Each structure stands twice: as C-alpha cells, then as structure tokens.
Amino acid sequence: MAESIPAQQFDPHAIEARWQHLWREKRTWEVTNTSVPHKNAYVLEMLPYTSGEPHVGHLKNYAVGDAVAHFLRRQDYYVLHPMGFDAFGLPAENHAIRTGKHPRISTDESIASFREQFQRWGISIDWSREISTHQPSYYQWTQWIFLQLFKAGLAYRKRSAVNWCPQDATVLANEQVVDGRCERCASLVELKQLDQWFFRITNYAERLLNDLDGLDWPEHVKTMQRAWIGRSDGASVSFRCAEVDHEIQVFTTRPDTLYGATFLALSPEHPDLESLTSGTPQEAAVREYANAARRAGHSDRGNDERPKTGVITGRHAIHPLTRNKIPIVVTDYVLMEYGTGAIMGVPAHDARDFDFARVLGLPIQPVIALPDGTIPKLPYAGEGVAINSAGIDGASSSDAAARITAQLADAGQGEGVVSFRLRDWLLSRQRYWGCPIPIVYCDDCGPVPVPEEQLPVPLPDVEDYAPKGKSPLATADEWVRTSCPGCGADARRETDTMDTFVDSSWYYLRYCDPDNSTAPFSQEAMRAWMPVDQYIGGVEHAILHLLYSRFLCKALADRGHLPVQEPFGKLFTQGMITRDGAKMSKSKGNVVSPRTIVEKYGADTARCYVLFMGPPEQGADWSDEGLEGVYRFFKRVWRYTEEITNSPAAIIGKNPDPERNLALRRKTAWAISKVTEDMSGRFAFNTAIAALMALSNDCSKALQDGISKEVVTEAVSTLASLLLPFAPHVASEVYHRLTGKHVWEEPWPVAEEELLRIEAVEMIVQVNAKFRGRISVPADASDDDVRHAALGLAAVRQETEGHHVKRIIVVPGRLANVLTG
C-alpha cells in the first residue's frame, strides 16, 4: 500500500510519481480474457498517430476516455481500456526523409515519447495490450485481412485514373482530396493512370447507410456519413460514341427528362476522356482544359454561380432512344465522384446545363410542361407533364420516368438503378513505410495471394526510401524476386504498400487478443469485448476512419470471423482546443505543449483543465488563467486535507451550528447527485467539475466557521472520490490520507435521498417586477400555494391594497411576480 505524503506543501509531482508507481507495480488497470464478467465495458480512444510528441488534442481525447473508464470501474464494470500506436504512413516517412533517420528508428522514438507522456499523465491504460501497427506481429494480420477480402472478391486490382500527389509521390483516396488538394500537404492533385488495388466498399453502401440508424452516434457524424455514401434513385443510361466503338454510362435521377438531352458532358477526370479524344483536332485543347480544371478546387467547381466553361470534344454520342447524334463535351462542373463522372445535359430542366448550353450555343429542348400544358420559364427543374417525348406526352413526371426507364430496358440501353456517391476504397500507396500487400505476380498465373502460413510478408529495410513515383520497394531486388505459390515459377512481389487507414480500421479487434500468434483474434475474445462500448475521438475521422472500420467489420462478420456487424456502439467526438481563437500550429507560434504544462502544474491540472474548459464536444479557447484556477482548486483541497488530518479535535474551529453540519452534508449529497448525473452518458465533465468546486467552497467556509471533523472529513473524502475521473492522483492521495483506502477500489458514492430532499425553499416576491420581500414555502409547493403565500406577505398586501391583481407569475423555486392593473 502506498504511503501518504507527510504534512507539507502541495507537491503534485511527488503525488503523481507515488501513485503511478503503485499502479504500475500492482498492474492495477490490467484485465484478462479468462474470467470476463457479464458486466463489462470496452472504452477506447482513437489510437494516436505517432509523429513528434503528443499535443493538447491528445491530452483532451485521453482525458475524456479516462474519465469514462474510471467512472465505469466504480460502477462495478470490468473495463478494457487499451492503447496502441498508428505507426505506418506518410508523416513518419517524410519525417525520416527530412532527418535522415530510418522511419523504423524515428517511429520507435516517437512511440517511446508518446508512451512516456501518456504514462506521465497517469492514464489508466492496460499497457499489457499495447500494439503498434508497424510491428510484424500486427501487420501479419493486416495482410491476413487483405487475403480474406481477396478471397471474397472484395479486394481487386484494376487500371484506374487516380489522384496523384506530386509532392508525396503517391496515390490518394478520393476522401483524402480536399478542394483539389492533398489533404496532408495541400499540393494540387494530378490525375494519373495506374494499376491499383481497391477494396469493394461499394458492395456495402446500402448496409453502411441503413445501419447508421441503429447507432448511438452524434447525429452530425451520421449526417456526414450519409452524405458521403450519397444514395440516389434513378436510371442508368448507356450512350454510345458515334465515331469510335465506346460506351459511356450515365446515371440520372430524372429519367423523365431524357428526351431533352442535347449533349453529353464528361468530367475532366473521366477515365475515358483521353482515349475518346485521341487523334482528334480537339485533343490538345481538351487536354489543356482538363489539366487546368483538375487543379481547381472541387468546392469552387461545384459553385452554381460560377461561370460555366468547357470544350466540345469533336466526338458525338448516340441518344439511346431518339438515335440522334448529340455532342460530347468536357466541362468542369461535372465531378467524377458524383454518379459516373458523365451526365446527360438537359439544359431546359437544369440550371447548370442551361447556363453551359448558352455559353457553347447548344440546343435547348423543353420536355416538361406545367400540369396545364403551358411551357414554364426555362430552366424549369420542377415536375409536371411530359411533352416532346415520343409516346408518353401528357404523362406525369413520375409516370414518364417509369415509362422511359422501361423503354431503356426494352432497348437494352439502361435500367432503373440506385446509385451511390461512395467509391471503392483505393488502398495502393507508392511509398515505402507501410504494410506490404501480400500478392505475387506470376507470368503464367497472374496475381496470386501469398499463402496464410507464409505471413507476414516482411517489410524489408531499404537504404533509399525517398518517393520516386513508384514504390521504393521496387529497388529491393532480393525481396521482390520470389516464387509463385501456385506453380513454383519465378514471380515478383507487389511493391505497393497499403493505405495506413487499413491498419487503423481493425486495431480495436487486436486489442481484445493482442498476444494471439495463431489468429488475429479469437472468437471468445470477440464475444467478451466487442463491440466497443464507448469510442472517443475527433470528428475529422467521421468519413475515413469510421466508415472504413464499419466496412471491414461487416466484411469480416459476413465471412464468419466476427460476431458483430458494427465496431462501435457509442461514439463521442470531442471539440478542438484553440488559442486566441485560432487553431494551434507551430507556424503561428500558439502551440500549447502538454509536457510544459505537466512539468509546471502536474498532470492532474492539465487533465482537469481540458475537461473544465467547456462542454467537451465543443471547441474551446485555451486560457492560462483558467489553468491557474484549476491548480488553485487542487491546492485548496490539499489545504483542507492538511487541516483535517492535523486536527486532533472532533470539532475543527469554533463550535459549529448543527445546521452548518447538516448544510454541508446536504451539499455533499447534492455534489454526488450532480456529478453522477453529469457522468452518466452526458459527458458534462465541465459542470461536474464546477459542482466539485462549489462543494470545495462550502468546505472552505465550514472549516473557517467551525465544523464537525466527521462531517467535513466525509465531505472532502467524497469530493476526492468524485474527483477521481478527472484528477486521479490528487483524488487518490486525498482519499487515502482521509480514509486509508484506495479510492478506485471503492464503489461510486451514492447520495442519501433524505439529504437530497429540501424541506423548504426561499423565493423572491415582486410586485410589478420590483422586489418586495421573500417567502419560505415547501419545496413541493404548488403554484397556487406560492401565489397564496406571496399575497400574504405584508409588503405585498400594502402595495396591492386598492389595486386589481391581474396575474401572479411563478418561477418555481425562484420568484413570484404579482402584476396589478
């Protein structure tokens, strides 16, 4: 058992070192898989990407998670609270290139720094389950997961136009391109044709969308995922190029307007654009326009108010029903991530098509009239009745859509379909520092999966890992050369590595069974812990990480590897900490270092302050004064402990009024009730801490005026007990000094109902909004009782004498306002 610090000044560093040593020595936060009780909980924060040192965003994330874990343990839950490190990827590799250190060395150094800081913060982690995604014992199973998806037809390779970051010299997924720029380095993204590996996440689009309804997630996160998946009902329409034998697929939500299509428009990123225009007089103009358009931000290109531009390609498409030739054009308002990257231009019934047609002088053909048959002002995007549409004139828009879709199906030119904005997950990366893809290429057998018993395919050490436009692994000749697992002939390994989001999309499963050497996890471990009960992290991961994790979980469950379809039951997203109203960055010189704060004030002050700044789901601005205020709060609690432990008398100070003892007991019961309510699923940590500060103030007044030692000891020890989730070191020390017990081993306090019951409340009485006195009424008094008491107040009787009382407004527990006429 830890020995308490003798009477002395508050020294947070000595307190923290003492309790951290005990927790480490006793392995206090470790849990096993051998005897998991029915009442268990899996609390998990998003694993950190190890680059440099932890920042205040990490501090807030893990302070939130640790508060939840401590609270649940005290509620008699058996809590799994693990930690690991996301270690592969571009930032680590680029850091290695800048410093000259091999990424394996610099990554291990960064992990050591993160681990040291987290332990210094006193986060209650089960360190026996630590993982790192760059360790062969982990990425062996990342490769295993790839093979399961490959066998199921969910991992495939094709030549594709991909987003290429010229600075990082690698491919980017659509989700990693923001306004035409690399999400990480802000370089303008280029288009490139490469053979790439994909996960067929689009097979799960409908389920990923529908299953959001059953998740206990913030609504704004679900809205973001719904928008990214982007379900639309409509029709697929086939247009064939008149000059070359090539078919172009279009998706439309308005098949009722098909007869009004007067041009076919392609996105500058459309994979067929180059082949369609090859050898034409317009080839150079198309290429120049497309390259310029690709460099523009997508949000700018999607702006309806932006002037429309484009180029006529010189090719024509055959209208699938009229058989007329219509021009094929390229225009930047068509985006590749929507539909198929090709649209049928219907200028009479789409504002953007209308503006574009007028710029290029293209025909405008109305095919929808108002219900009375009159042609509205164009462009008209509403519904009505069909006109100028062979065989269906007069039909309503909905009927016309169904009949035209049927015509397309009869002609073999289309069908009714559901389309999604979601695109398949591009996972190939032409960089060194990543998980090798377990595929070999044989001239006779083609792509062949590496047998599971040969995993892991190790990531070899290479001297030159700088980006070259192709994977640096291609230079590792001995590693590349291998034999075909199928026929034994000479073969070569895949030299691309996986997107690091693959590593971080299943790590929560490995935590449950990290030492398993024969499988990524056991079914028993999955049944014991999955799904994660409470997941915590930044909203910036709403689309990439969370969507990818849901897909992999469903794909593995469908193949019998998991007993759950969703990885995360509850989700909490914390807000960003800013300074002087701006996002923290080294270039702005406004970065707050957790290490500096901890060295000056101790870990508890840092942890408690980031939770006290405001509602944790919202952003908050850093304040050094606020930090100092939390530190002073701990010093006051320490002073109370000193006074109590050093006082031999049963009464501290002068003889107290018995009512003062009762008042402090009532305030203690109120604090228990308030903190419990704020911690029970609401994550209202800021108001919970404020309640403890209020209890602290009452303790201070009681000690000053005189109080029973027993009562104030109960109040301060209860304060410490309630403080554990936010400041575990101070809480443990104070509680131990006052009770001789370890606070984390004690059940969460429960307030006495009798103490919560307030016998009477004092209310202000006003006449025409002017103060006239106070009344004391029962806490459960009805509004009529309050009105009667207010009218009985002498000052009110005097004021209202000779006047008509029109109304008495009652604000329960606060005031009664008598209105006269």
Image (spheres, rainbow, N blue to C red):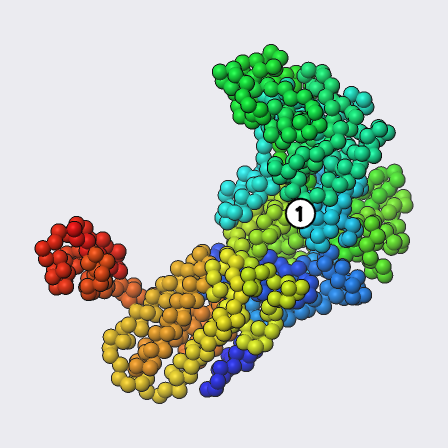
Which residue occupies the extreme top position in the image? 391
In front of the other: 194 or 374: 374
Percent from the top left, x then y, of residue 151?
A: 72, 40
From the viewer's perspective, tell me whether residue 466 is left or right of residue 522. right
In front of the other: 726 or 636: 636
Residue placed at 47% from the left, 65% from the top? 612
Which residue occupies the extreme left position in the image? 802
Q: Which corner quadrant of the image does residue 281 belong to?
A: top right
**Number of numbered tags placed on the structure image:** 1
Percent from the top left, x then y, of residue 658?
A: 24, 77
In front of the other: 814 or 153: 814
Percent from the top left, x then y, of residue 271?
A: 76, 35
Bin the neighbour count of mark 1 within 10 Å (Cα to Cα): few under 14, some 14-19, many 20 and up.
Answer: some
From the viewer's perspective, tell me whether residue 622 is left or right of residue 132. left
Residue placed at 71% from the left, 54% from the top? 185
Q: Which corner quadrant of the image does residue 817 belong to?
A: bottom left
In the rendered view, tell whether residue 460 sits above or below residue 293.
below
From the viewer's perspective, tell me whether residue 669 is left or right of residue 179. left
Percent from the top left, x then y, of residue 55?
A: 61, 65
Residue placed at 17% from the left, 59% from the top? 790
Q: Which residue is mark 1?
A: 178
In this orientation, does residue 534 appear? no
Q: What residue type is disc 1 on?
A: Val
In this orientation, does residue 386 appear? yes
In front of the other: 512 or 182: 182
Residue placed at 68% from the left, 51% from the top? 183
Q: Which corner quadrant of the image does residue 378 belong to?
A: top right
In the rendered view, tell whether residue 623 sits above or below residue 353.
below
Secondary element type, mark 1: strand
